[in-house]
Amino acid sequence: MHVESKVIVNLIRTAQNERFNENKLSGLVYEIRIKKYNERLQEIKRELPGLEKRYREGQHHKHKKAKKHSKNRKTANKKDRKLRKKR
């Protein structure tokens, strides 16, 4: 999403350059492009916080799982050692 927003900002700059410096774009085409680019930027700004939150929660969940598995292995190793001692 960050990459897409950077690309859109560059597209806006290109459209501005083509419209005002090079005079390649008509006013109508320029307005339509800028409107569409800005709409997409707004969508990204709305979606990004939720996606980042889910990503952080997913990373946190993975970390908890790793700890849990590690704890289970330690418990299993203790039980194995106790059984070996009894033999």
Image (cartoon, rainbow, N blue to C red):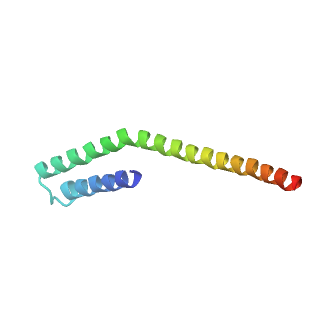
Residue 45 placement: quadrant:
top left
Q: Residue furthest front?
A: 87
Q: Position of residue 27 (x, y in %)?
A: 12, 49
Residue 18 placement: quadrant:
bottom left
User: Residue at the location (20% across, 54% down)?
Assistant: 20
In front of the other: 20 or 70:
70
In front of the other: 32 or 22:
32
- 66 lies above or below 42: below
Q: Is residue 71 left or right of residue 1?
A: right
Q: Position of residue 14 (x, y in %)?
A: 26, 58
Q: Which part of the image, by quadrant, shows the C terminus?
A: bottom right
Q: Position of residue 23 (x, y in %)?
A: 16, 58
- 52 lies above or below 13: above
Q: Position of residue 33 (x, y in %)?
A: 19, 50
User: Residue at the location (74% across, 50% down)?
Assistant: 76
In front of the other: 5 or 1:
1
Q: How many numbered tags mark residues here?
A: 0
Q: Is residue 51 left or right of residue 73?
A: left
User: Residue at the location (32% across, 52% down)?
Assistant: 9
In front of the other: 87 or 78:
87
Q: Is residue 23 left or right of residue 50?
A: left
